[in-house]
Amino acid sequence: MPKRTSKNRTIEVILLQNDRYLGEKYEIVRVKPIFARNVLLPKGIAVFADKAAKNNYKQKMEAAAVARSKKAQSLDELFTKITADEGIEIVRKANKDNTLYAKVDEHDIVEKIKEIYQIEVEPHLFKLKKKLAEVGNHMVTFAYNDLKKEILVKIKAEFDPKEAKKEEKAEETEVKEVKIS
């Protein structure tokens, strides 16, 4: 039996549907053989990328590559607009320590982009290590194939009249306590 090398520890498959972790439809990706055999092939997510399959899917793969390049170009234009607008701004309720009551995640960023620019972007393309929990400016990484961009997300605190009244009452009671003393 031949000795295993790093070259033969993965195999090539052609994806038959989009997968957020592997890639897009009609893209050739390298995966471990056991994953292909136990998951991708039985579920019809992919086929082996042998010579016959490459010939069968050649036109579809070329059309998909063109579509991916157009998508990358349109996303690049979108992020150029966002950069020209100095990022996107999200307004959320926050406490007096500038901590948000509801954290901002990828879905919130995508909603705001759709609201402002009327363009659909997949949330999984934004790479957040953790949800944004504080008021301020945050740099968020976006990655799509070879396109990697950083956008500025400005989180501002929403003015809450109820909270302001509570704070005013607390300050008034403190002032009264000081005058009594």
Image (spheres, helix red, strand yellow):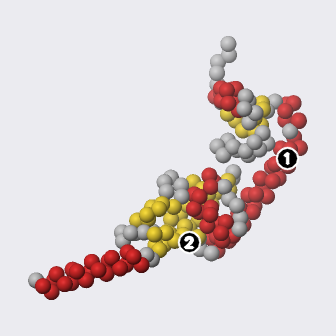
Secondary element at tag 1: helix
- Residue lying furthest top: 1
Q: Position of residue 86 (x, y in %)?
A: 59, 74
Q: Is residue 111 above or below residue 60?
A: below
Q: Which residue is mark 2?
A: 89
| Residue at the (36%, 69%) spot, across then down | 97
- Looking at the picture, how far across and down is residue 164, in whole percent? 37, 78
Using a 10 Å C-alpha cutoff, classify the residue at mark 1 as few (fewer than 14 neighbours), some (14 to 19) or many (20 or more).
few
Frontmost residue, 174 versus 77: 174
Residue at point 67%, 33% (across, down) = 31
Which amino acid lies under the numbered mark 2 shown in the image of this protein? Glu
> Could you tell me if residue 10 is visible in this image?
no
Q: Position of residue 71 (x, y in %)?
A: 76, 57
The residue under label 1 is 62
Callout 1 amino acid: Glu
Q: Give the number of the disc on residue 176.
A: none
**Left or right of 98 on screen, residue 60:** right
Determine whether the residue tagged by mark 2 lies in a helix, strand or loop: strand
- The quadrant of the image that shows the N terminus is top right
Residue 21 quadrant: top right
